[in-house]
Amino acid sequence: MITFDVGALIALERRGARMLRIVDAAAQSNTRITVPTVVVAEWWRGRPSKRMARLLEGIDIEPLDLRLAQIAGDAIAAVRGATTIDAIVMASAAQRGDAVFTSDVEDLSKLAAYFPGVRVLHT
């Protein structure tokens, strides 16, 4: 399974070849793609378009619940320099053992030590 960070959504929006192949492969293999709601908020930024809305079709949007927020908060406390959104992305992916696609490999890789079941991959 796959979790997208904001960098993955931006790459899709820009029609990045690698991300388009990943989405196509996921669709062909019925692999679930998840995007935490906080990632949508970071990506959307008041510039909605029909194209952006279409990109979210077929992607599971995961709400932030108390349990996920607490897991992310524990990670922020444990990993120096971790940010809230990055910790939420990694906590979300950890629940399923997902690979995370991001343009921010360095920061998310720091959190991977806290979430050892999550692979961090570049968009």
Image (cartoon, rainbow, N blue to C red):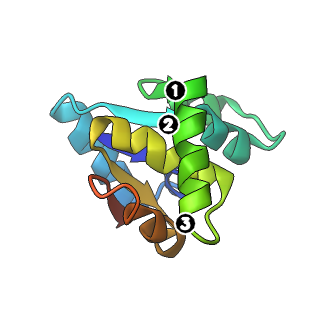
Alpha-carbon distance for marks 3 and 2? 22 Å
Classed neighbour count for the residue bearing mark 1: other residues with Cα under 10 Å, few (<14), some (14–19), many (≥20): some
Contact between labelled residues 2 and 3, with CB atoms less than 8 Å apart:
no
Alpha-carbon distance for marks 2 and 1? 5 Å
* Residue 19 position by quadrant: bottom left
Per the rendering, the mark at residue 35 is: 2
Q: Residue furthest right?
A: 46
Contact between labelled residues 1 and 3, with CB atoms less than 8 Å apart:
no
Residue that mark 3 sits on? 79
Counting from the top left corner in percent of width and height, residue 90 is at: 46, 50
Q: Is residue 6 visible?
A: no
Q: Nearer the viewer, mark 3 or mark 1?
A: 3
Identify the residue at horizontal 53%, vertical 33% (top origin).
68
Identify the residue at horizontal 65%, vertical 38% (top origin).
38
What element does badge 3 sit on?
loop
Amino acid type of the residue that numbered disc 2 sits on in the rendered structure: Val
Classed neighbour count for the residue bearing mark 2: other residues with Cα under 10 Å, few (<14), some (14–19), many (≥20): many
In-image side of 84 versus 88 (left or right): right
What element does badge 2 sit on?
strand
Residue that mark 1 sits on? 61
* The N terminus sits in image quarter: top left
Amino acid type of the residue that numbered disc 1 sits on in the rendered structure: Ile
Closer to the camera in the image, 103 or 75: 75
Alpha-carbon distance for marks 3 and 1? 26 Å
